[in-house]
Image (cartoon, grey):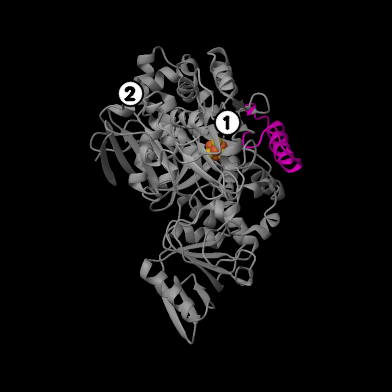
Amino acid sequence: MKKTFGGPALVLDRADINTDEIIPAKYLTEVTKEALRPYCLEDLKLEGFDAKGEKLRNARVVITRENFGCGSSREHAPWVFEVNEIHTVIAESYARIFRQNMFNCGMLAIELPRPDIDALIALELESNGSIDVEVHLQEQKVVARGNGRDVSCGFEISPFDKALVEAGGWVEYADARY
Amino acid sequence: MGQTTAEKIFAAHLRDEPFPGTMVLDLDRVLCHEITTPVAIADLEWRGKDRVFDSSRIKAVIDHVTPSKDSKTALQAKILRDWARRHAIKDFFDVGRNGVCHALFPEKGYIRPGFTAIMGDSHTCTHGAFGAFAAGVGTTDLEVGILKGVCAFREPKTIRVNLSGKLRPGVYAKDVILFVIGELGVNGATDRVIEFHGPVVEAMSMDARMTLCNMAIEAGGTCGICQPDQVTVDYLWPFIESEFSSRQAALEEYRQWCADADADYDRTLDYDVTGLSPQVTFGYKPDCVKPVGELAGTRIDQVYIGTCTNGRIEDLRQAAAVLKGRRIADSLRGIVSPATPKIFQEALSEGLIQIFMDAGFCVTNPTCGACLGMSNGVLAEGEACASTSNRNFNGRMGKGGMVHLMSPATAAATAVTGVITDARTL
Ligand code: SF4
């Protein structure tokens, strides 16, 4: 199924956030995605972050730093975002498996250079933690709104990743083709 | 222009190139375990596509939590077991015959030079030790692999790591790979294959090469690859005997997968490891590495020897050599998990199990167990574990626990004294 993108953003200003932090291994005994919902980012080591807080509950976009999603191959990491309606992650860079898992689920793992991430994070700070991100997939552009001003950043996405998002994921894509 | 090992394997398995740089490969192996496969099975059922592309190329094992510890893990095991039966997957390993996936599958001879393999497990990179391309994937890739026998990858770029010199006694493949990760950083090899070359690798056994390749992912690498050679052929010989007229013939065939001399690398790194000391990690990332001397004296509550990194027979021999005639400190617990039933039996017949038990170790059945903090030795808040595994993330072996990664010899020496210890000083 095709996903919707964009919405209120949560900033996680740290590099190397790993899959154990996104969804701890003890929840891997669940056999449905839905059951993961309450445990999103439960073990995240980040000052001031509250895994049970309002901020995470309202978020539809995550903005973060380098090497996001490193560690295990568990697709439970994108799934825990998916069931919390976070379909867009914007980071400086990703671990390969996490990034592929996002696109395989028909979700967006957008990569932006550090100055753009800096600008988005600065806008979030200036807006007291409340910014809204619009994703324009066709134009390959994100626009963040907060504190009465916009920050707009273009992004690159490979044609294959775009095709996966448009197909609704890798199963749909592969099924139609192979 | 010559090709790297990964480029050769990609070219030989290319099914489709839907866009430039995106390569859909045919798979020789789709490997499954009970944590990541059940959701794929459920999704295939839900889509009305409960089929497998080729039951002989799919191998499955229950290894992460086994025997099941509660109703949820019992259900995961049951879903995998029922599915394997339903599709006549004959290489399915249940309680009593099961072991840690990345030790068990190579030991059964399932991985050959030039193969492509995926598994819903990040340490699938281990199998590259055979000169194969093996990558960890998520459940959706696994699901498509099961159904269609294909997986998509970006065109591979390769980092070549030349390891020259000679390891000193008491320094092992684990120390080498921890050092290399310290150099590369946790994302230094993202979207890259790491190809290991040089006399140090050539002198390594398959067990040691698997330790080396196992941790490629800790630098972000897609796969670690060693060049197939006589050591590879000798290891595989019992399984390939009927396919080749001689070992020499097998070697010639497998050599086609070796990188060309003029292959194009993304980066080439040269390390002389002659002076290398045993390495230990200190933080919550596997690139936080120091020589053991700098961490000596750090208090430890539990020692864990096992896993897909260092639970093989050579690892147990190295640890037992340190433990022989000694007892572990009263202040800590020692746990050893031989990675497969075959390794367990070899350890029994060589008297290693006796040494571990005399020293005061708890010997568990083959399983991942404490490695990912799901069973058999979860840490309490504030505790520290000296572990031969591959990941030291915050909470990895239990919420609030600290993990120090090290070789089996260093772990054994640490068990004896109760604090991080260089085995060469005992
Ligand atoms: S032993 Fe640890 S790292 Fe290896 S497969 Fe099992 S859980 Fe993963």
Between circles 1 and 2, the one closer to the viewer is 1
Q: In the image as oriented, which residue stretches furthest toward the right?
A: B71
Q: Which residue is mark 2?
A: B203
Q: Is residue B191 magenta?
A: no
Q: Point out the stretch of residues depicted in magenta.
A: B63-92
Q: Is residue B9 visible?
A: no
Q: Amino acid at mark 2?
A: Ala
Q: In the image as oriented, which residue stretches furthest toward the front?
A: B330
Q: Which secondary structure, mark 2?
A: loop
Is the residue A1 above or below the residue B41 in the image? Answer: below
Q: Which residue is mark 1?
A: B330
Name the quadrant containing residue A77: bottom right
Q: Which secondary structure, mark 1?
A: loop
Image point (47%, 81%), residue name: A126
Q: Amino acid at mark 1?
A: Asp
Query: Which is more toward the observer, B90 or B377?
Result: B377
In the rendered structure, the answer to whether residue B382 lies left or right of residue B208 reads right
Which of marks 2 and 1 precedes in the sequence? 2
Query: Which is more toward the observer, B35 or B134?
Result: B35
